[in-house]
Image: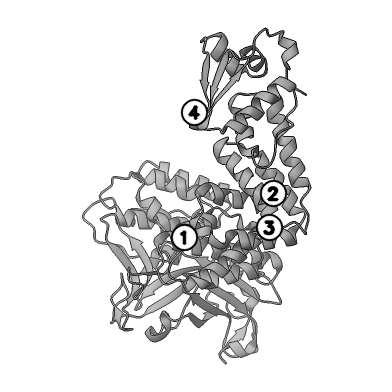
C-alpha cells in the first residue's frame, strides 16, 4: 500500500511543522500530511500541539526522503546507503506502509544474492539484519538472510570464515547474528572455532565461550566434535566454565558416536559404558535435603538410582549439621516415587553397605541414608556381582589416557556355567580414563583379553547396568559420580583430578600432581594408598 499524499489532506500550507535533523539541519513539512501517515506524529501534533520535532539521530537526506515518501506515497529515494536510517525512522514513527516497504526492499537485495556474489554484498545484508536485531529488536531480517544462505551452503561457509576473522572483537549482538545464521548447521561454526583455538591456544576468550555455550551441538558429527574436543584439551589455561564446555562437548560427542553406530552399546558382542563425572557445586547451594532430592530426581544427568544415591550421600556428608527427618517415611516415599517414575533399577546391597559408617556425633549424617536404603528391599538387591580392579599405577594415572583391564567372576549360585571346564566363568571390561573425567569401558569377548582362569561370558552382564565406585587401598567406598572433571591450578602447571568444593569453601581433590610430576595427597588418595575401581551391576533375572 502507498502513503497519504498532499492532495488528500487538502492542506492549505506546507511548512507549519519543523523537523530538526542531525547537525541542526531544518526540514519544513506539513503536519497534516505527516500525521495522516504516522500515528506518532499525529499524537505529537494533535494532542500535544508540537510544532517542532527533533530527529537529530537522522541525516537531513534521510529525513527529506521520509517526508517526500509521506507526500507522494512512494519511497523512490530509498537506497542501500540510506536504508538503515530510513528503516529505523519509519519504525520509530510507525509508518506501517513504509515499514513494509523496507522489508520488501531488503528481501529484494537478499534474493539477488548468488554463489558468485562478492563478500561485500553478503556482508551488507548480514550487518543490516544484525543492526535491525539490535536497534529494533526484530529478528525477521536475520531469518531472511539466514534462509538465503542456507540455500547456498558453499558460499555461506566461505563467507563466514572471512566474516569471523576478527570475531573476538565482535559485540554480543553480532555473535547472536552468527548463531541465527547457523541455526541449522553448527558444524560450520565449530570448524571455524576449532581452527581459531588451534591458532590461539592460550585461553578460551569470552566470545568463543559465548558461541560454544549457545551453539546447538545436536547436528554436529562425531568427527567435528572430536576435533573441537581435542583442541580444547590443549588450551593452556582453562577455567571452571571451560571445563563445563568440555564436559558438554564430550557428552554430545559420545551421543553422536552412538547415533552413527561407531560407539554403539551393542556391537559384535561388545558394549560400551560411559560414566561421566558431574559437578556437585550447584547442589551445594541448596539449603534442604528435600530440595536436593527433588533436583536429583528431575536431573537429566542422573540416569540411575546409583547416581541419585551418590548425590544424596555427598550432600549429607558435606552438610552434616542440617536437620533431616528420616523417621516419618516421607523421604523414603519420595525416593520410591522417583525410582518408579524414572524406571530405575534397584542398586546393589553391597554397594550401599560398602560406604563407611561414620562415627558422627550428630544424628543427621550419611549413616541415616545408608540405613534407609539397606532396610528397604524395593531400593536394594542382594543378587549382585562385584569385581575389583587392579591398582591404578601412579606414574600413568594422570597421563593422556589410562587403559586398564577389569575381570569379573560369577559369584552367585549361577556362577558355574561351563561345568566341564576348570576355572571361573566371567567377563572382562577393557577400560580407559580420559583427562575429561570420562570412563570409557568396553565389554569384550576377545579371548586374548581374558586371563587363562576366566572363561569368556560377556552375555552375563548388560553394560548399561554397570556402576562404578572408588575404593582407597581396600577401605570404604566413595561415590565417583560427582567428583567433577580434571582441573588445573591458575598457572596451568598442576593437574588435579576429581575436584569437589565443600560447603566450607575448601577444594578437595581425588588426586593431585605438581608441575614436577611428584604426587601430592588428594581427598583420599595418599602416598600410602592406591585407588581401585569397584564395579557393581544388577544381573538380569
Relative to residue 405, is residue 356 drawn left or right? left
Q: Residues within 10 Å of mark 4 (few under 14, many from 20)?
A: few
Screen quadrant of the C terminus: bottom right
Query: What is the secondary structure assignment of the residue under circle 4?
Result: helix
Looking at the image, is 270 positioned above or below residue 241?
Answer: below
- Name the N-terminal-most of marks 1 and 2: 2
Residue 146 - label = 2
Q: Position of residue 508 (x, y in %)?
A: 31, 65
Q: Residues within 10 Å of mark 1 (few under 14, many from 20)?
A: some
Pick the front one: 336 or 219:
219
Residue 119 - label = 3
Q: Are marks 4 and 2 in contact (CB under 8 Å)?
A: no
- Distance between the Cα atoms at labels 1 and 3? 36 Å
Identify the residue at image location x=46%, y=60%: 244
Residue 244 - label = 1
Q: Position of residue 468 (x, y in %)?
A: 47, 69
Amino acid at each position: 500500500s502507498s502513503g497519504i499524499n498532499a492532495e488528500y489532506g487538502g492542506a492549505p500550507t506546507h511548512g507549519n511543522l519543523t523537523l530538526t535533523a542531525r547537525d541542526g539541519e531544518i526540514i519544513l513539512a506539513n503536519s497534516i500530511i505527516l500525521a495522516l501517515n504516522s500515528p506518532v506524529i499525529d499524537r505529537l501534533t494533535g494532542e500535544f500541539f508540537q510544532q517542532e520535532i527533533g530527529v537529530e539521530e537522522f541525516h537531513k537526506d534521510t529525513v527529506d526522503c521520509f517526508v517526500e515518501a509521506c507526500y507522494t506515497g512512494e519511497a523512490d529515494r530509498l537506497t542501500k546507503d540510506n536504508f538503515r536510517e530510513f528503516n529505523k525512522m519509519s519504525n520509530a514513527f510507525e509508518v506501517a506502509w513504509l515499514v513494509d516497504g523496507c522489508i520488501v526492499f531488503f528481501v529484494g537485495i537478499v534474493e539477488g544474492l548468488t554463489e558468485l556474489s562478492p563478500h561485500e554484498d553478503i556482508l551488507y545484508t548480514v550487518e543490516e539484519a544484525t543492526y535491525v536485531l539490535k536497534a529494533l529488536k526484530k529478528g525477521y531480517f536475520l531469518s531472511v538472510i539466514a534462509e538465503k544462505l542456507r540455500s547456498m551452503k558453499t558460499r555461506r561457509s566461505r563467507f563466514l570464515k572471512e566474516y569471523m576473522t576478527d570475531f573476538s572483537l565482535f559485540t554480543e549482538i553480532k555473535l547472536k547474528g552468527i548463531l541465527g545464521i547457523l541455526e541449522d548447521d553448527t558444524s560450520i561454526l565449530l570448524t571455524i572455532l576449532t581452527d581459531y583455538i588451534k591458532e590461539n591456544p592460550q585461553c578460551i576468550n569470552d566470545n568463543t565461550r559465548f558461541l560454544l555455550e549457545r551453539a546447538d551441538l545436536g547436528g554436529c558429527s562425531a568427527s567435528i566434535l572430536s576435533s573441537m574436543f581435542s583442541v580444547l584439551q590443549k588450551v593452556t589455561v582453562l577455567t571452571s566454565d571451560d571445563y563445563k564446555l568440555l564436559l558438554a562437548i564430550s557428552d554430545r560427542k559420545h551421543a553422536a558416536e552412538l547415533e552413527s553406530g561407531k560407539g554403539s552399546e551393542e556391537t559384535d558382542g561388545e558394549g560400551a559404558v560411559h560414566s561421566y563425572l558431574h559437578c556437585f557445586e550447584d547442589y551445594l547451594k541448596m539449603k534442604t535435603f528435600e530440595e536436593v532430592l527433588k533436583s536429583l530426581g528431575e536431573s537429566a544427568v542422573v540416569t540411575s538410582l546409583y547416581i541419585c544415591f551418590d548425590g544424596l550421600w555427598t550432600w549429607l556428608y558435606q552438610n552434616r549439621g542440617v536437620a533431616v527427618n528420616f523417621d516419618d517415611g516421607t523421604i523414603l516415599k519420595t525416593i520410591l516415587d522417583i525410582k518408579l517414575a524414572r524406571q530405575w533399577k534397584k542398586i546393589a546391597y553391597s554397594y550401599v553397605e560398602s560406604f563407611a559408617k561414620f562415627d558422627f556425633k550428630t544424628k543427621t549424617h550419611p549413616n541415616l541414608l545408608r540405613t534407609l536404603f539397606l532396610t528397604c528391599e524395593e531400593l536394594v538387591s542382594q543378587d549382585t556381582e562385584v569385581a575389583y580392579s587392579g591398582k591404578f599405577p601412579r606414574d600413568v594415572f594422570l597421563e593422556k589416557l589410562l587403559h586398564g583391564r577389569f575381570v569379573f567372576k560369577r559369584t552367585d549360585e549361577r556362577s558355574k556355567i561351563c561345568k566341564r571346564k576348570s576355572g571361573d566363568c566371567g567377563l572382562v571390561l577393557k577400560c580407559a580414563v580420559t583427562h575429561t573425567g570420562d570412563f570409557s569401558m568396553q565389554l569384550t569377548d576377545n579371548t586374548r583379553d581374558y586371563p587363562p582362569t576366566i572363561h569368556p561370558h560377556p552375555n552375563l552382564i548388560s553394560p548399561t547396568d554397570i556402576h562404578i565406585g572408588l575404593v582407597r587401598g581396600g577401605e570404604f567406598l566413595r561415590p565417583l559420580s560427582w567428583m567433577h572433571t580434571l582441573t588445573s591450578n591458575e598457572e596451568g602447571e598442576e593437574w588435579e583430578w576429581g575436584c569437589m568444593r565443600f560447603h566450607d569453601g575448601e577444594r578437595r581433590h581425588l588426586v593431585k600432581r605438581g608441575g614436577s610430576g611428584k604426587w601430592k595427597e588428594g581427598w583420599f588418595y595418599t602416598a600410602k594408598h592406591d585407588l581401585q575401581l569397584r564395579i557393581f551391576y544388577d544381573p538380569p533375572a
